[in-house]
Image (cartoon, rainbow, N blue to C red):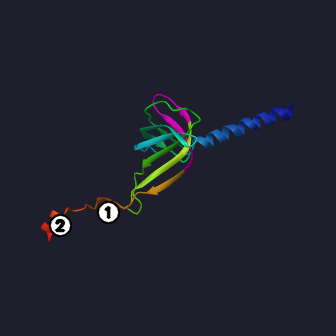
Amino acid sequence: MLDSQLDSQEDRSLSAKNERERRIKRRFTIDQEVKYKMLYGQRIAETGVGRTMNISSGGVWFTTENMLTSGMPVELSMNWPVLLNDSCPMKLMIYGCVVRSNEKGAAVAIERYEFRTQGSRAFQQTTVLSPLEVRLTN
């Protein structure tokens, strides 16, 4: 009996420790537009737009247009607020699963993520001159 009580106390202690560790992942308040796609197999079941409220290495909380179904896989896409090498915009792609949703938003557990470049800022800001403008500047 004493062994079972010790085991039970040890289980509770480990469980409490794991819960604390899970909660110490630093959350960053990032307010960015996020596009989401609810996936049903290879098909897109629902799409929407929201705003990120906070993000950590383990999850994202964001606003949604509708309540999302818990347990469903989801793909999130957001512009990253920092430029790569001070010139190249990036997009953060997050793949995960909805763990909680209410009328205010949804929480997604991150399974994997990747950054994608979107071309350099200088290239994006280059304007194409019309033939008339080219002649006038020569």
Residue 70 location, quadrant: top right
> As displayed, is residue 33 above or below residue 132?
above
Q: Do tag 2 and tag 1 residues touch (Cβ < 8 Å)? A: no
Q: Earlier in the sequence, mark 2 or mark 1?
A: 1
Question: Magenta span covers which residues?
Answer: 99-112
Which amino acid type corresponds to the residue marked 1 in the rendered image? Ala
Which quarter of the rendered picture does the N terminus lie within? top right
> As displayed, is residue 95 above or below residue 133?
above
Which amino acid type corresponds to the residue marked 2 in the rendered image? Val
Residue 71 location, x and y as percent? Answer: 59, 35
Which quarter of the rendered picture does the C terminus lie within? bottom left
- Mainly helix, strand or loop, the magenta region? strand
Q: Disc 2 designates what residue?
A: 134
What residue sits 69% from the left and 38% below the top?
A: 15
User: Can residue 61 be found in the magenta stretch?
Assistant: no
2 or 1: mark nearer the eye:
2
Residue 66 location, x and y as percent? Answer: 46, 30
Near-viewer residue (73 or 63): 73
